[in-house]
Image (cartoon, grey):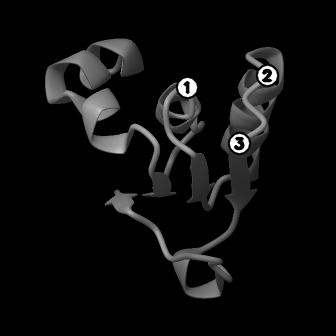
Amino acid sequence: VADPEHRRALLGLLDHVAGKSVLDIGCNAGFLAVALAKVASDVTGFDINPFLIEAGNVAARVLQRDNVRLSAGAFEDMKLEGPYDVVMS
Protein backbone atom coordinates (compact mmCIF):
# COMPACT_ATOMS: atom_id res chain seq x y z
CA VAL A 1 0.00 0.00 0.00
CA ALA A 2 1.64 3.23 -1.15
CA ASP A 3 -0.53 5.75 0.72
CA PRO A 4 1.11 6.49 4.10
CA GLU A 5 -2.19 7.45 5.70
CA HIS A 6 -3.65 4.08 4.76
CA ARG A 7 -0.55 2.23 5.98
CA ARG A 8 -0.70 4.01 9.34
CA ALA A 9 -4.33 3.08 9.79
CA LEU A 10 -3.65 -0.50 8.73
CA LEU A 11 -0.77 -1.03 11.08
CA GLY A 12 -1.99 1.09 13.98
CA LEU A 13 1.31 2.93 13.94
CA LEU A 14 -0.01 6.06 15.60
CA ASP A 15 -0.74 4.09 18.76
CA HIS A 16 2.72 2.51 18.70
CA VAL A 17 4.69 5.74 18.27
CA ALA A 18 2.68 8.21 20.36
CA GLY A 19 5.10 10.15 22.54
CA LYS A 20 8.08 8.05 21.42
CA SER A 21 11.36 8.66 19.62
CA VAL A 22 11.29 7.03 16.16
CA LEU A 23 14.04 6.04 13.71
CA ASP A 24 12.99 5.36 10.11
CA ILE A 25 15.76 3.55 8.20
CA GLY A 26 15.40 3.89 4.43
CA CYS A 27 12.58 6.38 4.79
CA ASN A 28 12.25 7.10 1.06
CA ALA A 29 10.70 10.58 0.81
CA GLY A 30 9.96 10.54 4.53
CA PHE A 31 6.22 10.96 4.13
CA LEU A 32 5.45 8.21 6.66
CA ALA A 33 8.00 9.71 9.07
CA VAL A 34 6.42 13.15 8.68
CA ALA A 35 2.95 11.71 9.23
CA LEU A 36 4.06 9.87 12.39
CA ALA A 37 5.64 13.05 13.72
CA LYS A 38 2.12 14.26 14.38
CA VAL A 39 2.09 12.15 17.58
CA ALA A 40 5.70 11.02 18.10
CA SER A 41 8.04 13.02 20.32
CA ASP A 42 10.64 13.09 17.53
CA VAL A 43 11.32 11.27 14.26
CA THR A 44 14.68 10.74 12.56
CA GLY A 45 14.73 9.32 9.06
CA PHE A 46 17.36 8.74 6.45
CA ASP A 47 17.58 7.46 2.92
CA ILE A 48 20.41 7.26 0.42
CA ASN A 49 18.58 9.42 -2.15
CA PRO A 50 19.03 13.15 -1.43
CA PHE A 51 16.21 14.15 -3.80
CA LEU A 52 13.71 12.06 -1.85
CA ILE A 53 14.97 13.51 1.44
CA GLU A 54 14.49 17.05 0.13
CA ALA A 55 10.87 16.21 -0.76
CA GLY A 56 10.33 14.94 2.78
CA ASN A 57 11.92 18.02 4.30
CA VAL A 58 9.62 20.22 2.23
CA ALA A 59 6.61 18.23 3.47
CA ALA A 60 7.81 18.58 7.08
CA ARG A 61 8.18 22.35 6.67
CA VAL A 62 4.78 22.73 5.01
CA LEU A 63 3.11 20.69 7.78
CA GLN A 64 5.16 22.52 10.44
CA ARG A 65 6.53 19.31 11.90
CA ASP A 66 9.64 20.63 13.61
CA ASN A 67 10.25 17.33 15.40
CA VAL A 68 11.37 15.59 12.16
CA ARG A 69 15.00 15.26 11.04
CA LEU A 70 15.50 13.72 7.60
CA SER A 71 19.00 13.17 6.21
CA ALA A 72 20.52 11.72 3.06
CA GLY A 73 23.15 9.04 3.46
CA ALA A 74 23.99 5.37 3.53
CA PHE A 75 23.24 3.35 6.66
CA GLU A 76 26.92 2.65 7.22
CA ASP A 77 27.73 6.38 7.24
CA MET A 78 24.92 7.66 9.46
CA LYS A 79 25.80 9.11 12.86
CA LEU A 80 22.67 8.37 14.86
CA GLU A 81 21.85 10.15 18.10
CA GLY A 82 19.56 7.53 19.72
CA PRO A 83 18.35 5.90 21.76
CA TYR A 84 15.12 5.29 19.85
CA ASP A 85 11.96 3.74 21.20
CA VAL A 86 10.76 2.56 17.78
CA VAL A 87 12.88 1.56 14.77
CA MET A 88 11.26 1.08 11.35
CA SER A 89 12.77 0.01 8.08
Give the residue type that dot 2 points to.
Gln
- Alpha carbons under labels 2 and 1: distance apart: 10 Å
Q: Nearer the viewer, residue 41 or 5?
A: 41
Residue at screen point 59% across, 37% down: 29
Identify residue for label 2. Answer: 64
* First of labels 1, 3 by sequence position: 1
Q: Is residue 66 above or below residue 43?
A: above
Q: Position of residue 58 (x, y in %)?
A: 81, 27
Q: Horizontal placement of 58 versus 88: left or right?
A: right
Residue at screen point 65% across, 77% down: 81
Residue at screen point 69% across, 34% down: 56
Identify residue for label 1. Answer: 38
Give the residue type that dot 3 points to.
Asn
Q: Position of residue 42 (x, y in %)?
A: 60, 49
Q: Is residue 1 visible?
A: no
Q: Position of residue 72 (x, y in %)?
A: 72, 60
- Alpha carbons under labels 1 and 3: distance apart: 9 Å
**Residues at discs 1 and 3 in contact (Cβ within 8 Å):** no
Identify residue for label 3. Answer: 67
Q: Is residue 42 above or below residue 61?
A: below
Q: Position of residue 22 (x, y in %)?
A: 47, 54
* First of labels 2, 1 by sequence position: 1
Q: Residues within 10 Å of mark 1 (few under 14, many from 20)?
A: many
Residue at screen point 20% across, 27% down: 12
Q: Please, what secondary structure does the residue beneath circle 1 have?
A: loop
Give the residue type that dot 1 points to.
Lys
